[in-house]
Amino acid sequence: MTYISSILYTIIVGGLFIFVFIFLYDWLFGEKREKQIRKIHKYFRNENVQKVEILEHLPKKYTLYQVKTGKETKRVKIKPGYKVIKMVQKKKEPAQ
């Protein structure tokens, strides 16, 4: 019985350690590009995403993507740790 409980304890603590290690690695060094693109598709699940382009990539700070949907083109900034921030484009002032 002690062998079974020690094996279960090792599996639980080991799994928790691996999960925390993966999360911290993504947060400190940035996610893989595939994870970021999956996150963008999940974020825009109500719209038809046609194309995703990388505009700027700073691994520890952010990655800037241009997402072309069925209706419009949007810029999205993703920070490490799966944080999606929508970018608002500046409106051009009418020429006078």
Image (cartoon, rainbow, N blue to C red):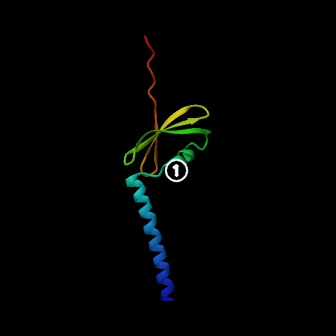
Mark 1 surroundings within 10 Å by alpha-carbon count, few (fewer than 14), some (14 through 19), many (20 or more): few
- In x, y percent, where is residue 25? 40, 58
Which element type, helix, strand or loop, lies under badge 1? helix
Horizontal side of residue 48 vs 20, given as left or right: right
Rendered residue at 55%/49% (across/down):
38
In the rendered image, the vertical position of residue 30 relative to residue 19, given as above or below: above
- In x, y percent, where is residue 20? 42, 63
Q: Quadrant of the C terminus?
A: top left
Q: Which of 3 and 31 is in front in this view?
A: 31
- What is the count of numbered marks? 1
- In x, y percent, where is residue 79? 42, 46
Q: Quadrant of residue 70?
A: top right
The amino acid pointed to by label 1 is Glu
- In x, y percent, where is residue 7? 49, 81
Rendered residue at 60%/31% (across/down):
71
Where does label 1 land, which residue?
34
Horizontal side of residue 47 vs 18, given as left or right: right
Rendered residue at 37%/46% (across/down):
61
In the rendered image, the vertical position of residue 91 relative to residue 65, given as above or below: above
Q: Given the current orientation, which residue lies at the most extreme top position?
A: 96
